[in-house]
Image (tube, helix red, strand yellow):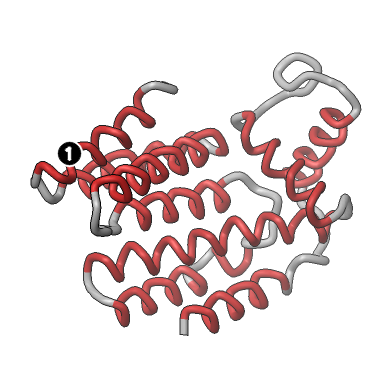
Amino acid sequence: MLAVILVAAAALALRGSNSALTYDEGTYLLSVLDLQRGQQLGTDVFAPQPPLFYGVVRLASWVFGPDVADVRKGIVVVLLAGVLGAYLLVRALVGPWAGLAAAALVVVAPPIPLDAARVYAALPALGLTLLALGLAAQRPIGRRMQALLAAGAGAVLMLAVGVKLSALIGIPPLTLLLVRRPPRAERGAATAAVAVLVVPA
């Protein structure tokens, strides 16, 4: 069922991959072209978004191709990671069927279906934030795996913040997810994630 939801999400999002450019998309894509030609972000190229957003766009261009429709595919992939994150988060807290419902809701909730393929910073940041929360909600057996997942959740959330600063709203729920169980076995995992969150700041 999750695979069906992800495929449906991709199909729904990619319907607009060949639509006309908006002003913001054109600005971002031109900025990335300037960066690829050796100009510096923040000096030669104006940076209205954090640096990692331009890194995401450049990576999408490298993986899928330089055309606008190709770059938009990369943005959709990041959003699909958020759909997976929503499933993992709600499944861990409520159950598998609720997780599927949450994933489906992310797919159809406005304005996501309309803007999922746009080269904007907001939806990739949202996707990474949801993935971070989904990882933080997991409760595997073993201290080492708990610590790895917690540190991974913190790292993914920092990536989200590097894409758009609005992802900072993910810090309180991530912290609550990591400390919601007080046993000693999980303190190391929570400490690892908090370290990942605090040190870059």
Q: Is residue 73 left or right of residue 35?
A: left
Residue at the image point whose x is 65% and y is 61% from the top:
76
- For badge 1, the amino acid type reads Arg
Picture coordinates of residue 101 (x, y %)?
A: 37, 78
| Quadrant of the rendered image containing residue 75 | bottom right
From this viewpoint, which residue is outermost toward the top? 43
Residues 110 and 5: in front is: 5
Picture quadrant of residue 88: bottom left
Is the C terminus in the top left, top right, bottom left or bottom right quadrant? top left
Question: Residue shown at 37%/72% (left/top)?
Answer: 102
Which is more toward the observer, 20 or 107?
107
Q: What residue do we see at 53% from left, 38% from top?
A: 164
- Check disc 1: other Cα within 10 Å, few if <14, some if 14-19, many if 20+: some
Q: Is residue 103 left or right of residue 4?
A: left
Return the residue nearer the eye: 92 or 148.
148
Q: Foreground residue, 26 or 81?
A: 81
- Residue 111 in percent (x, y) is at 54, 63
Q: Quadrant of residue 187?
A: top left
Q: Is residue 157 left or right of residue 41?
A: left
Q: Which residue is mark 1?
A: 187
- Residue 109: % across, % down: 47, 70
What is the x, y in percent for residue 34?
86, 29
Q: Residue at x 78, y 19 (%)?
A: 40
Above or below — where is 30 with respect to 45?
below
Looking at the picture, does residue 80 appear above or below residue 22?
Answer: below
